[in-house]
Image (cartoon, rainbow, N blue to C red):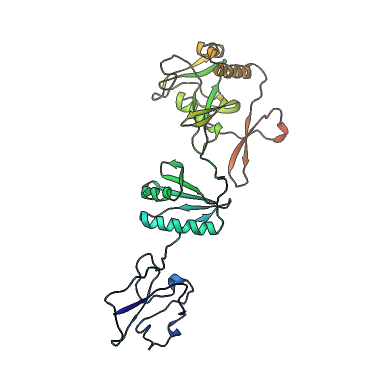
């Protein structure tokens, strides 16, 4: 039969190798201890331990020694729980990217131990990225104080602020970005469309081609794409004429809308059947004179800005290609006319 000895900080024996005690000692008779590492969880390999716990030291007792019917598990048994893999971020926090499935109970234990460890290290924000198929891990995380931050088609991001100080974790993206394209040809005609859905459906309103900027897409590229998708017209980006900000526009998000001027390089219209009822070239003054445009101040302002640009010397914001500190390419929009010394070359803009 076997006698079980609890491993704890109070254990008086340190087994660096098999020779720490005589092989004839009844305490470790027929036991093989091979580990030489100082880690408590790996001091002993004398017998197979229960999953998730530090292994126990076992030894065969002589026939003259009193024995037990079965191994005894003591109340203060030491638990061995693996910490979650985490990467330190630049703001005193950590990020956990769950890549493999995990039992929810084991995850809860690992998360609790990890939070304690991160708290001891003075960490602040914790980010846990869960693939969509790991939905079983959401509940144990929420039970330990995590909250939803944002969700994408393939993952959910949970966050938690550890210290007893004001939470400074950045909120999810607060704005949606849209574009409207003012495309005018040499005849002073504006490219306009009528939409088959949304607030303009069935109202007979001719409006500028508009759309939402895709993730990772530049404003100038989005304007070119939307014109091509809705009307089939190829165009070159010129500049941003104006932009407006509104709030509570889309699932509590704010909205940034950029009015962009484009120069057409083709003129044949082939409308998008799924979204557009009609598309045409319309005289600029006729577009601005529509009752809807005249009655709604914001649309009236936009029309006047576009007409001013086509008739007078109005300077908008042109894109200048630049490289960020992290090595990414981005666009700086500025008044190229009045700040021409900024660059000796023409701004690089996406072409259709």
Residue 144, position in %: x, y? 44, 51
Looking at the image, is 231 positioned above or below residue 44? Answer: above
Inspect this view and state whether residue 166 appears: yes
Relative side of 224 to 323, left or right: left
Count how many numbered circles sit on residues in the image: 0
Instruction: Tell me which corner region of the image, top left, top right, bottom left or bottom right, holds residue 349.
Output: top right
193 up-or-down from 228: above or below: above
Q: Specify the quadrant that holds the N terminus.
A: bottom left
Would residue 233 appear left or right of 105 to someone viewing this image? right
Q: Residue furthest left?
A: 69
Rendered residue at 31%/74% (across/down): 71
Residue nearest the viewer, comparing 199 with 250: 250
Give whichever of 59, 262 is nearer the camera: 59
Compare residues 98 and 61 and report the one nearer the observer.
Answer: 61
Q: Pinpoint residue 24: horizontal percent, then vertical percent.
A: 37, 89
Give the percent coordinates (x, y) of residue 31.
36, 81
Q: Is residue 232 above or below residue 155?
A: above
Q: In this rendered view, identify the residue nearer to me: 118 or 157.
A: 118
Left or right of 331 on screen, residue 151: left
The answer to whether 321 is drawn above or below residue 201 in the figure is below
Q: Which residue: 39% across, 75% down?
A: 45
> Is residue 185 at least partly visible in the picture?
no
Q: Position of residue 195 (x, y in %)?
A: 43, 20
Q: Quadrant of residue 346?
A: top right
Q: At 31% from the left edge and 85% from the top edge, which residue is drawn?
A: 65
């Amino acid at each position: 039969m076997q006698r079980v000895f609890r491993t704890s900080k109070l254990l008086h024996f340190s087994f660096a190798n098999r020779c720490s005690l005589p092989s004839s000692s009844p305490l470790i008779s027929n036991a093989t201890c091979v580990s030489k590492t100082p880690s408590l969880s790996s001091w002993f390999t004398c017998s197979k331990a229960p999953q998730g716990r530090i292994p126990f030291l076992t030894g065969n007792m002589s026939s003259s020694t009193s024995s037990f019917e079965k191994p005894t598990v003591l109340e203060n048994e030491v638990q061995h729980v693996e910490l979650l893999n985490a990467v330190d971020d630049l703001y005193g926090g950590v990020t956990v990217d769950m890549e493999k499935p995990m039992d929810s109970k084991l995850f809860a234990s690992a998360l609790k131990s990890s939070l304690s460890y991160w708290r001891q290290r003075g960490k602040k924000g914790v980010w846990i990225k869960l693939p969509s198929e790991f939905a079983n891990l959401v509940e144990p995380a929420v039970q330990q104080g995590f909250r939803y931050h944002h969700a994408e088609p393939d993952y959910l991001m949970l966050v938690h602020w550890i210290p007893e100080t004001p939470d400074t974790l950045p909120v999810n993206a607060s704005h949606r970005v849209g574009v409207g394209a003012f495309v005018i040809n040499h005849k002073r005609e504006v490219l306009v469309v009528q939409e088959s859905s949304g607030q303009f459906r069935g109202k007979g309103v001719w409006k500028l081609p508009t759309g939402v900027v895709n993730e990772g897409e530049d404003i100038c590229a989005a304007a070119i794409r939307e014109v091509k998708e809705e009307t089939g017209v190829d165009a070159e980006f010129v500049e941003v004429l104006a932009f407006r900000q509104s709030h509570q526009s889309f699932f509590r998000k704010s909205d940034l809308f950029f009015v962009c001027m484009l120069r057409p390089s083709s003129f044949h219209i082939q409308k998008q059947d799924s979204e557009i009822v009609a598309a045409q070239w319309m005289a600029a003054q006729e577009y601005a004179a529509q009752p809807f445009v005249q009655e709604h101040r914001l649309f009236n302002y936009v029309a006047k800005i576009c007409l001013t640009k086509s008739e007078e010397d109005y300077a908008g914001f042109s894109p200048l290609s630049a490289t960020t500190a992290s090595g990414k390419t981005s666009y700086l929009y500025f008044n190229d006319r009045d700040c021409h010394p900024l660059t000796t070359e023409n701004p690089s803009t996406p072409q259709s």
